[in-house]
Amino acid sequence: MKIRSADREDIADLLNLYRHLDPADKETTVEDGLRNLELLKLYPGSTILVGCLGEAIVASCTLVVIPNLTRGAAPYALIENVVTDARFRSRGYGKAVLKHATEAAWHAGCYKVMLLTGSKRPEVLKFYQDAGFEQNKTGFQIRRLPPRAG
């Protein structure tokens, strides 16, 4: 699998992959996707990583590098929208994309990488633990949209 940053030509395929996160989620238009990809690029080090088998995008995550005023001004990173096409799960593709994202965060000088999951399913939590993430903080959120199922 080849891992790279998504580009404009990937948006339609990426939006199709996101249907594996929550098929009932409101669909994003290609135009909105293109606009938001350009906005994400305004944050140095931030990207949407895609894992490709040939031309097919089979796994992805979003990496956001956030400027910081503590920790000697070292930034921190947030990973969001971790997804693997259901037909390609349990083959290590998702973990490979997460590893690449973490290495990119370290390269950007981040002192930590965070991610959240709303899932309580043991296999999902094990996936993140096996990818090197520790469940050692308490997360809080306020949502405008209802959480995804699962």
Image (spheres, rainbow, N blue to C red):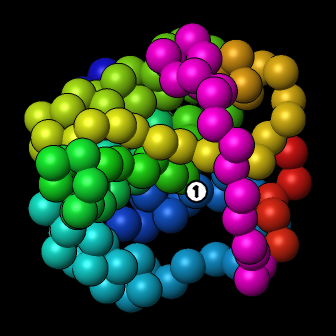
Query: Is residue 107 left or right of 7 when viewed as pictured?
Result: left
Which residue appears at 41% of the width and 30% of the height? 98
Q: Residue beneath label 1, please?
A: 18
Residue 107, image x, y percentages: 12, 35
Say if the magenta span includes residue 8. Answer: no
Residue 115 visible (yes or no): yes
Image quadrant where residue 39 sits: bottom left
What's the residue type where badge 1 is placed? Tyr
Q: Nearer the viewer, residue 105 or 33?
A: 105
Residue 4 visible (yes or no): no
First to last magenta residue range: 128-145
Q: Tell me if residue 20 comes above or below residue 37 in the rendering.
A: above
Residue 50, image x, y percentages: 34, 43
Image quadrant where residue 127 sits: top right
Residue 63, image x, y percentages: 35, 50
Which residue appears at 65% of the width and 27% of the height? 135
Q: Tell me if residue 23 comes above or below residue 2 in the rendering.
A: below
Q: Nearer the viewer, residue 121 or 78?
A: 78
